Amino acid sequence: MADSDNDYLVQSPDPQHPANLIPELCAKFWHLGWVTGTGGGTSIRDDDLVYLAPSGVSKELVKPADIFVLELSKQVNQKERIYLRKPPVLKPSQCTPLFIAAFTKRNAGCCIHTHSQWAVLITLLLERQRANTKVFEINNIEQIKGFARGFGKEGNLGYHDTLRIPVIENTPFEEDLTDSLEKAMEEFPDTCAVLVRRHGIYVWGDTVHKAKTQCESLDYLFQLAVEMHKLSLPWLSNII
Amino acid sequence: MADSDNDYLVQSPDPQHPANLIPELCAKFWHLGWVTGTGGGTSIRDDDLVYLAPSGVSKELVKPADIFVLELSKQVNQKERIYLRKPPVLKPSQCTPLFIAAFTKRNAGCCIHTHSQWAVLITLLLERQRANTKVFEINNIEQIKGFARGFGKEGNLGYHDTLRIPVIENTPFEEDLTDSLEKAMEEFPDTCAVLVRRHGIYVWGDTVHKAKTQCESLDYLFQLAVEMHKLSLPWLSNII
Amino acid sequence: MADSDNDYLVQSPDPQHPANLIPELCAKFWHLGWVTGTGGGTSIRDDDLVYLAPSGVSKELVKPADIFVLELSKQVNQKERIYLRKPPVLKPSQCTPLFIAAFTKRNAGCCIHTHSQWAVLITLLLERQRANTKVFEINNIEQIKGFARGFGKEGNLGYHDTLRIPVIENTPFEEDLTDSLEKAMEEFPDTCAVLVRRHGIYVWGDTVHKAKTQCESLDYLFQLAVEMHKLSLPWLSNII
Amino acid sequence: MADSDNDYLVQSPDPQHPANLIPELCAKFWHLGWVTGTGGGTSIRDDDLVYLAPSGVSKELVKPADIFVLELSKQVNQKERIYLRKPPVLKPSQCTPLFIAAFTKRNAGCCIHTHSQWAVLITLLLERQRANTKVFEINNIEQIKGFARGFGKEGNLGYHDTLRIPVIENTPFEEDLTDSLEKAMEEFPDTCAVLVRRHGIYVWGDTVHKAKTQCESLDYLFQLAVEMHKLSLPWLSNII
């Protein structure tokens, strides 16, 4: 049976079906400037099924028929990906192993990858400022309350908590980021995101809603932090 | 009778009905970047009925069925809120006591809470510049004419008038802002808004239209003021 | 006959009818941030009939039924405006005498008033930099070719031409700007716009299309000029 | 046969037909701020047929009926353009010879011209910084992977590759740019774009998709580079 026969996997009248949600999210992210010029991607996991936006497509134009589907439990070999459904003329996303890491290591239900300029600028500012510190830190901003406290923990961060997002170095081939992304997940077990130097960010969450709103909140904080830097306002403060 | 039975309260073919206006406003505010990542909220009062956007929802996706309703005169106890209508799976907004303060203390018809980055940056600039001055002031900008002269007063501010918006300190729990918000209302009886340090802003008005346009005008002034600061242009000037 | 009886004046199935164009333009300008919080306005002249957006309305929500209509030739007294059609609950725009100045002194077919922040910032930068120079000047930018050469002249400005936009001082009451606007028109007979200090801009053109595109091109140049100022790049240069 | 008789050339129910794609792209570019005030343009080549957006039209309002069509192989004389279809009241784009250069010299399938402010600012920064260096260079940014390796070459640029975009000087008449644009194409045979000082950019690609996504990726890099400049972050770095 050809991969492309399983079209039923991406055909549903339910707007909450992953094959309908991914196009809606991708279009939204394109308008936010996060997935310019085919950059970035989005994946949703529904139990063992993983739905993926294709590579090399204008993200505001993604259609349900463009979605790749694979079974998480069947991916024994990172080099030889087996797809339940594969659109004939499209290429799978190079982000796939990174999305899978979020699904397997963090039990995420959705993972979003953007090339947000604010995220890139934060990694550039950190690169220059503190060469050995591979983490973005900010505290005492209300928006921090938008993040889950951590993997397997109940509730969200508080206003006085410090949000910490690790930064990993970029590699020429996106799939080669997988090891360092997984290492960052281990070192920062509570993080919901990993910044990639000069590249962008990966953000995940238990649900599509949580991944999306955490991605929005992070972008809000990155933009705010760049503006704070321009105005010589520090990202960390001692307020009690 | 279960709270969720009163669905008729949020079902109306009239686009001006609060249950239809709140979703429209929330979507507009999301596109303006004011309610990113479930932050912020909106409430409309129609006589004794108060309609509230839910907490923890992507604000561009709010539906009439998501709206909470309560009776203003029945809220005798801040800790035990009684709802006429409560969507079963959603949580009420933590902003509720602050919205109620605007309705009871200022007879407002609508109150909007945003996490606007321009508002947050203004509070950060004030925090650094003048630690003991808890007010944003600007004058001699035409947009100032967009604000009501004050509570119980006729007409709008004039071009040469100084707009003053008080700033209160943020607290870990949003409901704990209520006392200082009410105190700021007393100290600045004519203000239509209170800035919350490192958090955002609460804006109200006699009508939905007035609250919305004052919120827009404030955001315009905050953005302008941040740009003025970058260009070393003072917020206050002596022009006659 | 009551003013409000002439509803036929604003009812047309033609999308190019002024009563249909004004709402479309106002909504577009609101999304561009030019008419935030009821600020700004738009007027179209069709032969002797002048169509005006109302005052005090959220500009993205203007409807054909909200439009005021007057006869240009019948306006003998600035203080007592006579309307052919006047929506019962709305107030006419305070910009009316300024729009009329563009129609009578420059034979304009459309006049647009915005509170664009870029325009306001330009007037603030000029106020500080050169107190006695009441004109914004820029040259050697391709977008300058988007402006008509001048009143009664054929063709557009060239790349090497210097665009000059006069600045007038703001007044507490918008109608009091009329004299200085007319004076600026006389002093700069070829200008298609007048900047108002700390307020915004008035832009006109022979047609709706010309007024709109000149307003867009000006805003482009103001934004560019503010960014150039931040980067210490001069607005005038000697290139041949 | 009059030029305007060939209406069938721009009438198709297929959304992928050039006469339908050009209006869609122009509207998208207007919302991105690339073709403000009638500036800029877009052309698609389908085999020997070239479709062109008209000059002097608000780009968000372009309709299929506004599209010009010519045969590439029939254009023997640059001064006397022969159109297969010419809308009676519209003027052809002054960019036509530049679009044709991309089609004939680089076998492009689509060419886009924008007045993007980020592109203009980059040319201004280069003008000041290094008067004799007529090229924008950036490396070690992930988005660089969005560009084709070069004319007649397979694949895309890599993360460590340096993207080089030549800059040519502006001229009073747009068609006079043709020679220097062609010269820049020869000097930088792999470039997919040419910056025009104080004017904007021309970007092309083998397909509509490639031209559009390369144009987006360039604008992303120009905006990022301006922000990097403001933050004193260099465009070139040594990372391996």
Image: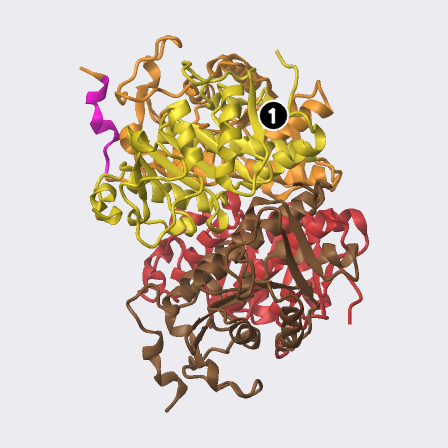
Chain colours: A yellow, B orange, C red, D brown
How many numbered marks are there? 1
Residue positioned 56% across, 72% down in the render:
C107
> Among all residues in the image, which is located at the extreme bottom?
D1
Magenta stretch: dominant SS? helix
Residue positioned 28% across, 67% down in the render:
D13
Magenta residues, as a range? B3-12
Vertically, is A240 above or below A220?
above
Q: Quadrant of residue A235?
A: top right
Q: Amino acid at mark 1?
A: Val
In front of the other: C67 or A218: A218
Mark 1 Cα within 10 Å, few/some/many (few <14, many 20+)? some
Give coordinates of residue A117: x percent, y percent. Answer: 57, 41
Q: Secondary structure at mark 1?
A: strand
Report whether B146 appears left or right of D176: left
Residue linked to disc 1: A135
**Callout 1: chain:** A
